[in-house]
Image: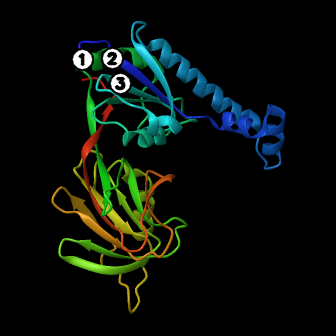
Amino acid sequence: MSSLAPRIVLVTRQSEYQALLANHGTRGQAAFYLQSRDQDINDVEKVHDTLMSAIQRTKAAIPEDWTVVDVEREDLDRFLFSSNDIVVAVGQDGLVANLAKYCSDQPVVGVTPGASGSEGILTSVQPTAVGKLLTQIEANHAIVEQRTMVSANTSRGESLSALNELFIGHRSHQSAKYIIRIGEDEEIQSSSGVIVSTGTGATGWAKSIMAATHQTFEIAPGDPKAIYFSREPWPSQQSGCSLRAGTIDHNTNLNIISRINEGGVIFADGIEQDFLRFDWGRRATISIAEKTLNLVSGRSE
């Protein structure tokens, strides 16, 4: 870290309760809306209160002479990170995945708002432990896990990186046609898209695919490799399914050429709104990203 006091970038996202108030205007109208769908606003409000408490306790743990900047998830693509930043994300695991592509070498601390708000995979640090952890980071004594990321680079010079997984296919997840190449092997496929997952993502979307297809790959979050799956590839006279799953690493990339007339996309970590177009003729090289997510562990050395 720099000799200057670190700047804390506190990343949060709008709670479901806040979103309901924004959409319906008042608590009463939001409660009526939920009640019509057999839901109770008290449950949603409880989760919101827990999140707000976690945010306040996290802020209270930050040294008083350190600068704190609040950033909403929706504003990350417009925020300029600096080398002296420590990123603190309070919320669900997906929040850390969402911000990973915007970071470079900054350490990231994932803070859990409680069992009801997080699985605790990427946001596992308790708010009460944040203060001690920040001083350890400043002194370079913290345990940092380097989480592998994957990237997609298109023939038009566009790029997108992901911590969990990349999706390549049609935006509606309907059948998509493409040419898939890995090493010397090539195949025309028609499927509901290709998923490329890191070891971090292997606990999510990829896990469900492996369970459904009985194709299992051993991969840890820090392993410098990724696994790919073609979702329900359709064998026909024009398309095959022999390259339906496999691995890539620093020496082996996955290359895909779109044969999607319209609606082809590449998106990362489940954020469908932030995508690269992947219509007919566009090429994408999927590889292990040069950068990693520097996730700070709450464990002691």
Is residue 255 left or right of 16 when viewed as pictured?
left
Nearer to the camera, 179 or 155: 155
* Residue annotated with mark 2: 6
Above/below status of 64 relative to 249: above
**Which quarter of the image is occupied by the N terminus?**
top left
Q: Amino acid at mark 2?
A: Pro
User: What colour scheme governs how the chains and residues are painted in the rendered image of this protein?
Assistant: rainbow
Is residue 33 left or right of 266 when viewed as pictured?
right
* Residue annotated with mark 1: 2
Please tell me which of labels 1 and 3 falls first in the chain. Answer: 1
Residue 42: x and y in percent read: 75, 33
Q: Which label was assigned to residue 86?
A: 3
Residue at the left extreme? 251
Q: Are dots 3 and 2 in contact, CB under 8 Å? A: yes
Above/below status of 44 relative to 299: below
SS under mark 1: loop
SS under mark 3: strand
Nearer to the camera, 272 or 146: 272
Q: Quadrant of residue 295?
A: top left
Q: CA distance from mark 1 to mark 3?
A: 11 Å
Q: Residue at x 40, y 20 (%)?
A: 8
